[in-house]
Image (cartoon, rainbow, N blue to C red):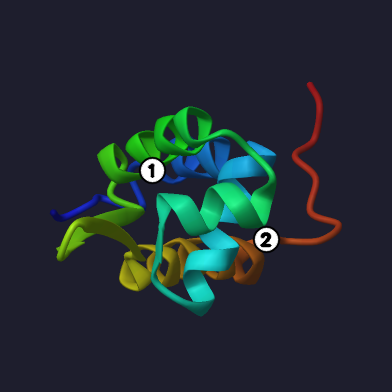
Amino acid sequence: MTVEVEANAGALLKLLGEPLRWEIVRRLAVEDLCTCHLSGDLDAGQPLISHHLRILREAGVVRSERVGAFTYYLLEREVVAQLADVLGELAATSAEGHRRPCS
């Protein structure tokens, strides 16, 4: 899945601004996990974890992979890297102290 990160940066930031989704992404940055891992580690019910994983998957931030009877979730690292690039460009182009005159 190709995600247009620059065009959807605001939506991705809003999506990642939800604390449980952010924590899921942080944990998936370290290792691929299944719902049961996330549910236990985050002390949240499996239906709630599945709900957030579906949202992250539909946004292209994570993908799923079947391993035997289990479904593991993997972070789409390129999407996160592209979002970081967009934010870095924003910081680099910001003009501190520049003000448009009022008329």
Left or right: 79, with 42 as reference point: left
Report helix, strand or loop for mark 1: helix
Q: Position of residue 93 (x, y in %)?
A: 60, 65
Q: Nearer the viewer, residue 68 or 101?
A: 68
Residue 33 lies in what quarter of the image? bottom left
Report helix, strand or loop for mark 2: loop
Specify the farthest residue to the bottom: 30
Q: Nearer the viewer, residue 9 or 23?
A: 23
Above or below for 7 versus 26 = above
Above or below for 99 versus 85 = above
| Residue at position x 37%, y 34% in the image | 55
Residue 24 lies in what quarter of the image? bottom right
Q: Nearer the viewer, residue 90 or 57?
A: 57
Specify the farthest residue to the top: 103
Residue type at numbered disc 1: Leu
Q: Position of residue 89 (x, y in %)?
A: 53, 68
Specify the farthest residue to the front: 69
Above or below for 91 versus 2 = below
In this figure, which residue is indicated by the disc labeled 2? 94
| Residue at position x 39%, y 71% in the image | 32
Q: Residues within 10 Å of mark 1 (few under 14, many from 20)?
A: many
Q: Which mark is first along the chain, 2 or 1?
A: 1
Q: Residues within 10 Å of mark 2 (few under 14, many from 20)?
A: few
Q: Nearer the viewer, residue 90 or 82?
A: 82
In this figure, which residue is indicated by the disc labeled 1? 56
Q: Say if mark 1 contacts mark 2, CB within 8 Å.
A: no
Q: Position of residue 1 (x, y in %)?
A: 13, 54
User: For the C terminus, which image quadrant?
Assistant: top right
Residue type at numbered disc 2: Ser
Q: Position of residue 38 (x, y in %)?
A: 53, 54
| Residue at position x 46%, y 52% in the image | 36
